[in-house]
Amino acid sequence: MNGTQEQTNKPMREGYTTGACAAAATKAALTALITGEYQTESTILLPIGRLVTFTVEQLSLTAEYAAAAIRKDGGDDPDATHGALIFATVSWADGNGILLDGGQGVGRATKPGLPIAVGEAAINPVPRKMITEAAAEVLVHHALNKGVKVVISVPDGEEIAKKTLNARLGILGGISILGTRGIVVPFSTSAYKASIVQALQVAQANLCTHVVITTGGRSEKLAMEQFSHLPEESFIEMGDFVGFTLKQCKRLGFINVSLVGMMGKFSKVAQGVMMVHSKSAPVDFDFLSRVASEAGAAAELIEAVKGAHSASLVGDLMLEHNCPSFFDVLCDYCCRSALRETGGGIAIDTTIYSLKGRLLGKAARNE
């Protein structure tokens, strides 16, 4: 077996969530504050029941507070927060509870529909539980009944957040502290699906009844120009998860759903493929030739479609041979596929653009 094959077949390395890093940093900082001893490691129990030991990369200690930092490791599926330092600063507080807040680089919720209340630091429920339990464990271990204040911060968080959808969701000023299991599974689709659901819930909480779902940033920009009357919460990047997003739209009660995308992926949607990753299913050129026939294309053009090697080329052929109705028929097929996926009861419209931003076709169905 050659080196490339060995690398391909190697098990993927798991990473850890920002929530796990924050909990480990909290335990290290509070232990240092109590004992006066610098900590080099911090072991916590993850929500999945696994004990994990983190390396403490930085630690500051005074009589009033201690601050510890853990570096976020995304494993073999690094995200925008991979490599960021997650700090926990702990100090004593009045009473005997554990107060938790966000500092520099941790965003704050400004819109309803998130799992945290408006005005609160963007530390999600499971990480909140992990952090407070880590602090409580240290207090119990040292037989202390004192109040503790924990502030989670990420020095580069505000810059990192620009690479995320936080601003769209109403999380301003930094990143979110996330995670439900404590680990990051390489190339897992669960995190992306969770972000889709969260974006839809924000739209719902902001009383949007019409959402526009797009396959990426380029199509979303075009969609925002097309539907400029809609608030930004109405626009959802679904990536390749067309079927999943449509079902969530139906489940959450949206009345109107607009699909906006490019020729390549929407050619798959038209033929009924609801996961449009490049490896999920090939473009069916026989299907596209039938669409061309329904659009009134000449026999030679229909044959040319059958021999095409990409959906974009098919689009180019239709424009070159002046057959614009092809795109409207294709959009209609997208609407039909979407209605089959949702079981109806929702108004669907589809718009297809060229890679250069040219409007190619539209269709709408309400069944």
Image (spheres, grey):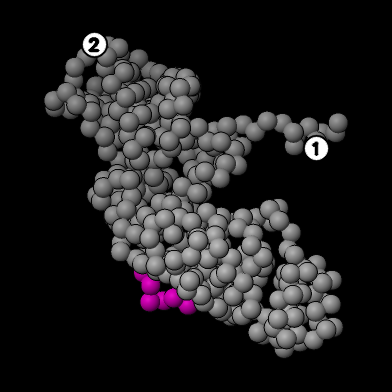
- Magenta stretch mostly in which secondary structure? loop
Residue 67: x %, y % from top left: 34, 29
Three-letter amino acid code of the residue under disc 2? Ala
Cα distance between the residues tagged 2 and 1: 54 Å
205 left or right, relative to 333? left
Q: Secondary structure at mark 2?
A: loop
Which mark is drawn over residue 185?
Answer: none
Q: Is the residue marked by circle 1 packed among few (<14), some (14-19), or many (20+) residues within 10 Å?
A: few
| Residue nearest the viewer, comparing 364 with 221 | 364
**SS for dot 1:** helix
**Residue sitting farthest toward the bottom:** 322
The magenta segment: 224-231
- Which quadrant of the view contains residue 358? bottom right
- Quadrant of the drawing holding the N terminus: top right
Above or below, comparing residue 100 to residue 198 in the picture? above
| Callout 2 crowding tier (Cα within 10 Å): few <14, some 14–19, many ≥20 | few
Q: Position of residue 263 (x, y in %)?
A: 65, 70
Residue flagged by tag 1: what amino acid is it?
Thr
Q: Is residue 141 visible?
A: yes
Q: Which mark is residue 4?
A: 1
Numbered badge on residue 143:
2
